[in-house]
Image: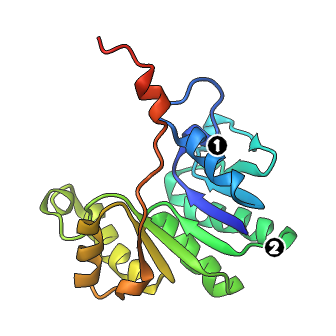
Amino acid sequence: MNILGISLDQSLLADGPAIGDGVWRQRQYAQALGHLWYVVYSLRSRGYQPRALAENLIAYPTGSRTRFHFPLDAHRIAGEIIERNRVDLLTAQDPFTTALVGYRLRRRHGIPLNVMLFSSFFDNPAFLASGPEARVLHRLGKVLVRRADTVRVESPVERGKLIELGVQAERIWTIPLMVDLARFAQADGD
């Protein structure tokens, strides 16, 4: 299986020590796949280049002029990857901008879309109170999770919330994030 992801996780592009275990996790996922590509939001000013994280795992920066250019840049780069390779599944890291890019790719290329939802955004008063942009994203996200082929959540609580939103239960997968427990076992308790 070959997967193309749309991501906001710039740790996939940066050399040096990573914060968290995103690179480790993606390498673990890649071991079970034919190919795993990520198109990752980045600003042009950062100067990121495509980065091979494993033989079958490559992260491509969007090199966007501004964050508002990200969806168009991600769509273009992902489209180029699709034209050159067989892609079996699209995955979006969040139900907002990355899901919008994934949804547009799904419609254009007919590739199934999985949207990941790892936080309680929907109908969350704190998120909605954070500003007008959050309210627009909230409405967009609800539409996109309903239109995704599948949605991945971390907990039964989030699964229940999606069912209340009208997402069919059989399209929701509860799969927690993989965590590098060895890092915690080796950590100094102080």
* Residue 100 on image: x %, y %: 50, 73
Query: In terms of depth relative to the viewer, which is nearer, 54 or 61?
Result: 54
Relative depth, front residue between 37 and 27: 27
Mark 1 surroundings within 10 Å by alpha-carbon count, few (fewer than 14), some (14 through 19), many (20 or more)? some
Q: Quadrant of the N terminus?
A: bottom right
Quickly name the residue at label 1. Answer: 44
Structural crowding at the residue carrying mark 2, measured as other residues with C-alpha within 10 Å and reported as few (<14), some (14–19) or many (≥20): some
Q: Nearer the viewer, residue 113 or 102?
A: 113
Residue under label 2, please give it: 86
Task: Name the residue: 48% across, 79% down.
Answer: 150
Which mark is drawn over residue 63? none
How far is the residue under mark 1 from the one under mark 2? 28 Å
Residue type at mark 1?
Arg
Q: Give the percent coordinates (x, y) of residue 12.
A: 61, 41
Point 51% across, 83% down: residue: 149
Q: Residue at x 70, y 51 (%)?
A: 31
Q: Position of residue 145 (x, y in %)?
A: 40, 78
Q: Is residue 32 left or right of residue 161?
A: right
